[in-house]
Image (cartoon, rainbow, N blue to C red):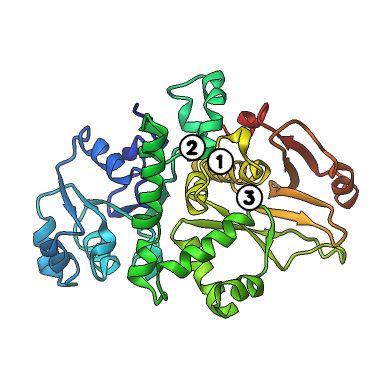
Amino acid sequence: MKIRRYYDNLDSYLEPNKALVILGPRRVGKTTLLNGFLDTTTLRYKLDSGDNIKVQHVVGSQDFENIREYAAGYELIAIDEAQRIPSIGQGLKIMVDQIPGIRIIVTGSSSFELSGQIGEPLTGRKTTLRLFPIAEMELTDRFNRHEIRERLPERLVFGSYPEVMTAAARADKTRILEELVHSYVLKDILELERVKGSKVLLDLLRLIAYQVGNEVSLSELGAQTGLDTKTVARYLDLLEKSFVLFNLRGFSRNLRKEVTKKSKYFFYDVGVRNAVISNFNVVEERDDIGALWENFIMLERLKMRSYRGIYGNPYFWRTWDHKEIDLVEEREGKLFGYECKYSGASGKNMKNWRTAYPGAEFATIAKENYLDFVL
């Protein structure tokens, strides 16, 4: 089963003397996307890998003449796993500035951002695309709405990584997810940052997994993992930058009764979340379906906003007397509140929300209507 990705036509993002940077978690299909594009392009291209020591030596050398010779005669330079190249940002800047008309595509895991290699050198010289696990909106190319909804329970358990979705048996899906968590998900952090080891990261992730949808206390996480709060904050930041977790902060317009200091954390893939706690039970047998549904909706909405270029600030909203809205979007000068309920509409907090913010929109997102929200 092949799913066409949203960025299937990379040609529309390529510009002369600019780099196209494709970032995302490991194993989400960046290499497949690149190779698919190269199979169809009419540009004369060179494809290399950042794992190649010779490429590392040339592109990372910051030697103008060597880099010009490396790219001579090509209209497009493509480098997969480019984060392996030391000083990759400077090397790409030299190509962009010194070779007229050159187009560049590089793919890499989030260690690009972790190591700060490309940000400053390529300021004004790059376009960045973020590729996620397969989005619900990408499924519409192959399935109709009924079929997408029919397969929803499976995605709530196993998530949306391409390898997982194409595996036929539940045992294969479980095996792939376990391998993803233990061999890929944490690899960038362990390679690039001072971390005490994978065990402490997995312990931290398990605690977050059990608290999905709830506000997180750094001091409590520290007490349970044996880490100080500064280290917990640093590890959470690394897990965000490596596309393992993302967070929502509290929304407030300075009303004293609102809580804003804490964050909620969600996983970039619910299958990874379930693998972290080793729970692959079917939806009907789960006692965490509310948290799982909230994570799923937050994630799919994030993918949709990113792919469709919907600009807005996401938050959650809670008051000291425990009235809350799961997701608040501030966009186009308006407020939109959403409550995530897997089984049917609730709307119990709608009145409180609209009293606090007259004119704000409100909707409940359930399994019956969620596709209108994420497509």
Distance between the Cα atoms at labels 3 and 1?
Answer: 15 Å
Secondary structure type for disc 1: helix
- Residue 321 in percent (x, y) is at 88, 59
Distance between the Cα atoms at labels 2 and 1?
Answer: 6 Å
Q: Identify which residue, 94 or 247, lies in the foreground.
A: 247
> Dividing the image into 4 quarters, which one contains the N terminus?
top left
Disc on res. 312: 3
Q: Amino acid at mark 2?
A: Ala
- Residue 90 in percent (x, y) is at 27, 69
* Pointer 2 residue: 135
Q: Identify which residue, 357 or 178, lies in the foreground.
A: 178
Front: mark 3 or 1:
1
N-terminal of the two: label 3 or label 1?
A: 1
Q: Residues within 10 Å of mark 1 (few under 14, many from 20)?
A: many
* Pointer 1 residue: 300
Task: Tell me the residue at 19%/35% (across/down).
Answer: 42
Q: Amino acid at mark 1?
A: Glu
Secondary structure type for disc 3: loop
